[in-house]
Image (cartoon, rainbow, N blue to C red):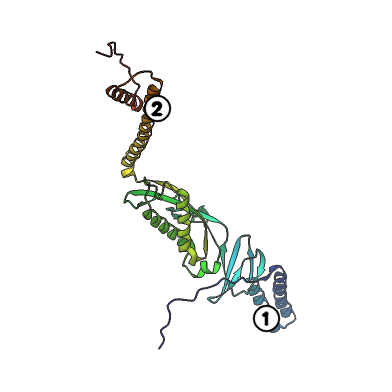
Amino acid sequence: MKSASNHSAPVTEVVLSALSGWSRIWVFLALLVAGVALVPTAIMARMPATGFLLGIPLIVAAIVGLTGLMAVGPNEARVCSLFGDYRGTVRESGFHWVNPFYTKRPISLRIRNFETGASRTPELKDAQGRIVEEKGRSHGRPSKVNDRHGSPVEISAVVVWRVVNTAEACFHVQDFEDFVVVQSEAALRSLATRYPYDSEDHEMSLRGNTEEICQQLRADIQERLDQAGVEVIEARISHLAYAPEIAAAMLQRQQASAIVAARSIIVEGAVGMVHMALEHLAKDNIVDLNGERKAAMVSNLLVVLCSDRHAQPVINTGTASN
């Protein structure tokens, strides 16, 4: 006995060629007018049974036929299904007519964007049914996650996307919009844990390799959204910082690293200047310095050149022999 598979077959998008709605609307309106006019005419002619038998079906057929009309705007689509069976997608904009029994689900093909960490705000209406607040999304809150070194960081990203396969978007996931948001958040958190916030040994980091990190983020999100018929156009880091509890300590660390790097450059330059000064003195025979006086001169020059304060010279009024 074969066991039934729990996985449904993948649904492939099929472009549905709809008929022109303008040519059909006049036909159904004519049927509706004829059916409405036939009933009182038959009653006046003392043939009510004939009027009802012919007029009522015409009215019903016209009303049912009119429900097959639909308008598709630019960058919009209608996913048509018949009693749960996918029939195709109407992508061409305009006024169309399809089978009145089709379920026509609208899907926007426009480019959309959102910021991770944002929450959806539902549409609010008053007691009279008037819209008080439009539905939308709040501003994104950065996600707190530990980087590869275990340091807590706050990170958020802006994701730009659009639907490219309407069948997969409708039938492969429950709610493709929420699916995009949740999977993007998960991909961002996973990315942040694989790289350090900052690096001193030239390895890839979140702060130092922005372009590469954004490209990797886009690829990670796209891999998760392939089954939902969504194309990720762009993914950019919009906020990146250390968590508040360690921000001050990490700032001091960055400042100390910058000071050490600057000092190393200063020392390297000072040693070069001292070496050049000694070479010029020896070459031009300006003064004859023994080893002890060279050491003193090198020490004094390095102190003056490497100090972060202005030098205060002290003049020795004694003779060299003293």
Question: Between disc 1 and disc 2, whose residue precedes?
Answer: 1
Image quadrant occupied by the N terminus: bottom left
Label 1 packing within 10 angstroms: few (<14), some (14-19), many (20+): some
Q: Identity of the amino acid at label 1?
A: Phe
Which numbered marker is on residue 276? 2
**Count of residue discs:** 2
Image quadrant occupied by the C terminus: top left
Label 2 packing within 10 angstroms: few (<14), some (14-19), many (20+): few
**Residue occupied by mark 1:** 52
Q: Position of residue 203 (x, y in %)?
A: 39, 50
* Front residue of this view, candidates 269 and 62: 269
Q: Secondary structure at mark 1?
A: helix
Q: Secondary structure at mark 2?
A: helix
Q: Nearer the viewer, mark 1 or mark 2?
A: 2
Please say if the residues under marks 1 and 2 sit with CB atoms less than 8 Å apart.
Answer: no
* Front residue of this view, candidates 196 and 44: 196
Residue at position x 41%, y 20% from top? 284
**Left or right position of 95 against 237:** right
Q: CA distance from mark 1 to mark 2?
A: 115 Å
Q: Position of residue 172 (x, y in %)?
A: 48, 69
Q: Identity of the amino acid at label 2?
A: Met
Residue 300 against residue 44 in the figure, above or below: above
Residue at position x 46%, y 52% from top? 212
Q: Is residue 258 visible?
A: yes
Residue at position x 42%, y 55% from top? 188
* Front residue of this view, candidates 142 and 209: 209
Residue 234 against residue 316 in the figure, above or below: below
**Left or right position of 17 against 12:** right
Instruction: Examine the image and state in which quarter residue 26 appears.
Output: bottom right
Q: Residue furthest right?
A: 45
